[in-house]
Amino acid sequence: MIDLAACDVVFLSFDEPNAEAHFAHLAAAVPRTRRVHGVRGFDAAHRRAGEIATSAHVFTVDADNLVTDPGFFAGRLDLSPRDLGSVLSFSARNAINGLEYGNGGVKLWPRATLLGLRTHEHAGRPEAAVDFCWTVPYFQINRVLSEVHVTGTPAQAFRAGFREGVKLNLGGGRLAYDVHPDLPRGEALLRHVGAANHERLRIWCSVGIDVAHGDWALLGARLGCAMVALDGFDPARVADYGWFARFWQEEILPAHDTEAGRRAAIARLGRRLRAELGLALADLDAEASAFVRSIYRGRRASGPMPVV
């Protein structure tokens, strides 16, 4: 049994445009919330959260996350002893496309795990370079505690879409096409990432044009997917803040500074992903996008995730 009211809560922010509003909202509802701000690197920021916390288990809340169920932080969680050492990942609803899964959601960490992290920019092996979930014990819980807002600015929207477009081509920290080099790429992708993540990738690449800056997220998701699946892009780069800033300023923003240009690029990438990856994507107008998001109820996955 974990007494959640005794667990420290740490809000992690770097450059998110909605960070101040989300922090104020969380701190008002959960006054014990602490904050780590401006620490460069995913691994470093999370280890810093472990350093400022004192409880055996620690909640982390990303800055683009608006907590919608603050009462949960005052409850108790009955957990099997075998899972007490796992990171508990709670689902979040993504405001741009309606997906509900662990991406961006609240996490409950054993403090010892935070202090011993060696992932992302400090990864010692490739599987740890892109996400935490493949090299530390993770347990997915399908209770939605928050809503993720990633379209505050064009840069934030593009970055969020690009990262997921890349990450959803991986399973166990490895690219589908490295694991199944002899299969057609579309077949390798589905076999390796599974039906749920395959569907999430399609949703990221199809839904959101009706949201402010949603075209940037769609562009990012389709471009990230194409670059990693078809062009040999190194997925570890999505954890490199410096590379991403240069990529945005020097390549993406100058090439896509008009709405018409972005729409054309989104359509062009869609044709390529359908033809070369067999990815069934939809080019939705604003009305259709809003409708899909309003009715979509995605696949649910829960339980322990494999550690490699």
Image: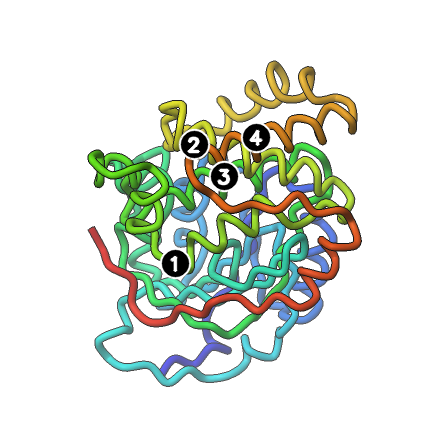
Look at label 1 and name its amino acid: Ala
Between the C-alphas of marks 4 and 1, the distance is 22 Å
The residue depicted at 56 percent of the width and 57 percent of the height is 34
Q: Residue at x 46, y 76 (%)?
A: 6
The circle on residue 195 is: 1
Q: Answer with mark 4 or mark 1, whichever residue precedes in sequence.
A: 1
User: Mark 3 or mark 2, which is nearer the start of the sequence?
Assistant: 3
Q: Is residue 219 above or below residue 289?
A: above
Q: How many angstroms separate mark 4 from mark 3 (CA)?
A: 16 Å
Which callout, 4 or 3, points to the residue nearer the camera? Answer: 4
The 10 Å Cα crowd at callout 1, few under 14, some 14 to 19, many 20 or more, is few
Query: Residue 146 at what x, y percent from top left?
Result: 60, 65
Residue 55 image point, x, y percent: 40, 67
Mark 2 nearby-residue class (10 Å; few <14, some 14–19, many ≥20) = some
- Residue for badge 3: 163
Q: Which SS class for mark 1?
A: helix
Q: What element carries label 2?
A: helix
Q: Mark 4 points at which residue?
A: 269
Upstream in sequence: badge 4 or badge 3: 3
Against 172, residue 120 (above or below) is above
| Residue carrying label 2 | 276
Residue at point 39%, 32% (across, down): 229
